[in-house]
Amino acid sequence: MLARPRAAYTLVEFLLVAFMVAVLGAIGVAALHDARAKKDLARCKSNLNQLGKAQILYADENNDKFPRCEGVEYLATLYRTGCEDDSSHFVCPATGDAPDGEALAAGREEGTSFRAYDNCDAYLANRGGWHCGTGLPTRIVMISDRSGRHHDGAYNVLFPDGHVEAISEDDPDKKWALGPLRESEE
């Protein structure tokens, strides 16, 4: 009786399949990481947009003026006055920080991952537009990420006119905004 050949894979075939699975897995993991980073960037911009609406609400209730303070106290004022009562809007999801309304209300840094700047001369003028004594409303940083490290060197920035923009440290056209952003990390 003749022996029938066994149907088996050779070592080379097995290693080739294992290599292909590893390569496809690496591509999938990289794609998931990129998608998560984009999601966090979009949520961070959305949170800053909400804070922009809160500062407009605050100005509407306070003779068209923003809070007269800076840093975490500015953000705490928006929270304590109820202009923005969702503490999750004060945190960038890319930082991994948990929202802490109690710390925010007390004016402590751990209550937020954002930074507000001293721009007390920016205010609503006749409800028709923005007046900013230091320049154009599209060139004044009101609130930003405290650090650009969690967005691959880009900071999400809120301007007085309400728009939010990601500003990269590598963008030569946005050098004017990087001074205050870098100072906030020190």
Image: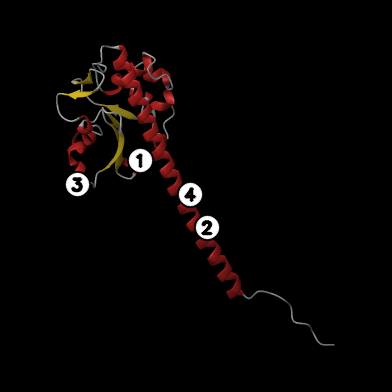
Instruction: Tell me the quarter of the image containing the N terminus.
Output: bottom right
* Secondary structure of the residue carrying numbered label 2: helix
What residue would you read off at disc 1? 150
The picture places residue 68, in percent across and down from the top left corner, at: 23, 16
Q: Which of pointers 3 and 1 lies earlier in the amino acid sequence? A: 1
Looking at the image, the residue that sits furthest to the right is 1
The kind of secondary structure element at disc 4 is helix
Q: Do residues under tags 1 and 4 come within 8 Å of each other at their CB atoms?
A: no
Q: Residue at x 74, y 78 (%)?
A: 6
> Which residue position holds label 4?
32
Residue 147 appears in the picture as rendered: no
* Badge 3: residue crowd in 10 Å (few <14, some 14–19, many ≥20): few
Q: Quadrant of residue 177?
A: top left
Q: Which residue is mark 3?
A: 172
Q: Residue at x 26, y 34 (%)?
A: 185
Task: Please state which amino acid type lies under the numbered disc 1.
Answer: His
Mark sitting on residue 167: none
Give the class, few, some or many, for how many residues have Cα within 10 Å of label 1's Cα (few <14, many ≥20): some
- Identify whether 39 is placed above or below 4: above
Asked if residue 29 can be seen in this view, the reply is yes
* Tag in front: 3 or 4: 3
Query: Which of pointers 2 and 4 lies earlier in the amino acid sequence?
Result: 2
Instruction: Give the label, 3 or 2, closer to the camera.
Output: 3
Q: CA distance from mark 3 to mark 2?
A: 37 Å
Q: Position of residue 101 (x, y in %)?
A: 42, 20
Percent coordinates x, y for residue 58 in the rendering: 32, 16
Q: Which is closer to the viewer, label 2 or label 4?
A: 4
